[in-house]
Image (cartoon, rainbow, N blue to C red):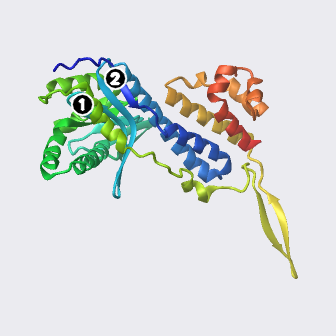
Amino acid sequence: MGFFNNMKEPVFLKESSNAKEKLKLLKDLEPHLNAEGIKILKQDIKNIEYGITGEKKIEFELKNSHMPMYVLHDIYLEDDDLSAQIDYLVFTKKLCFIIESKNLYGNIEINNAGDFIRMTEFNRRKKKEGIYSPITQNQRHMDLMKKIRVNSKRNLLTKSLSKRNFEESNKPVVVLSNPKTILNAKFAKKEVKEKVIRADQLVKYIKDTYNQSNRIAISDKDMLMWAQSYKDVHKDTVKDYTKKYEPYKVTTNQQIIEKVVSHKSEDKSIPIIQKAAPVNKTNLYEELKTYRLNKSREENFKAYTIFTNKQLEALVEKMPTTKDDLLAVEGFGETKANKYGLDIVRIMRKYS
């Protein structure tokens, strides 16, 4: 049976992800946190945004592959105390590809021991740090899939066959989706190199791996049943993403917090209200610059395309706290206000 049969194009059986919902929850939380909490929150938001951007690039590659396959996006599996959040499962007529998406910044080196080392440079200062191996992470996903698959079989013979065939029919792969990331794997072992690719290599990797496989191709119907079997055990997780920020919550929606202090005299305690001094506009200016820089890196644009220095100064001067206010600032039309307005207004409200 050939690779191309009746089915000609990829089909997404599950396309949705809870990442955007999580992102909205965290952004709505920002006005309720103190400075330390906001710092933690911003890093978490940035990581989620990187993840969404990376997964979108993989989605684009798969949708434009013109290959017969079934795709599951953002699958959550559980078995006893084990769990796995899998970015993509791609089912072809011979193989299932377990894809771990990584939108990593900086350059990645994989050494002979299989360690992942990230190298970054900022203001001419180079930083080298080890990061958790996405190969190890993906292997754990695969192990849980194998356990669920084997346990679903009813007798010892089918369990044994399923266990033996699992490694042959499932291929874990880490996809680096940031086009600016340079991968240096010249010292990595062959079996490690084969499990890490760039997003623009994904379709070729799937085709080549498929064609090299000696497995017998299954029918379109069986391929659908294979994919559906994992969709059926997917669990919609209900998590409280805001719980970790509880210690950083403030009692008002503003960053200017009123603090009650006790002023003691000789015979009584007199409570007084002491207001924290307003944050000056220098801090606002710096926060807007940081936002602009992070957004430009995320979108791979020059910083001035988000807003220019002149527009930045106008924001600080006019202090827009609504979309209509923002539209009154020179340089902010409907398109830019719709794209960046919510983020900018949230920042402004902290200083108003």
Image side of residue 331 versus residue 149, left or right: right
Measured as percent of width and height from the top left, residue 25 is found at: 59, 44
- What residue is at 24 percent from the left and 31 percent from the top? 222
Instruction: Name the quarter where the C terminus is drawn.
Output: top right
Image side of residue 153 versus residue 83, left or right: left
User: Crowding at label 1, few (<14), some or many (≥20) Cα neighbours within 10 Å?
Assistant: few
- What residue is at 20 percent from the left and 50 percent from the top? 154
Measured as percent of width and height from the top left, residue 158 is found at: 15, 46
Instruction: Name the quarter where the N terminus is drawn.
Output: top left
Residue 118 appears in the figure:
no
Q: Residue furthest right?
A: 267
Tag 1 and tag 2, C-beta contact below 8 Å? no
| SS class, disc 2 | strand
- What residue is at 50 percent from the left and 51 percent from the top? 239
Quarter where residue 135 is shown: top left
Quarter where residue 42 is shown: top right
**Above or below — where is 273 with respect to 99?**
below
Measured as percent of width and height from the top left, residue 119 is found at: 37, 38
CA separation in Å, label 1 and label 2: 15 Å
Image side of residue 95 versus residue 178, left or right: left
User: Crowding at label 2, few (<14), some or many (≥20) Cα neighbours within 10 Å?
Assistant: some
Question: Which residue is disc 1 drawn over?
Answer: 222
Question: Is residue 91 or residue 318 the one in the foreground?
Answer: 91
| SS class, disc 1 | helix
Which amino acid is tagged 1? Asp
Which amino acid is tagged 2? Pro
The numbered mark, 1 or 2, whose residue comes first in the sequence reads 2
Number of numbered discs visible in the structure rendering: 2
Measured as percent of width and height from the top left, residue 6 is found at: 26, 17
Residue 10 disc label: 2
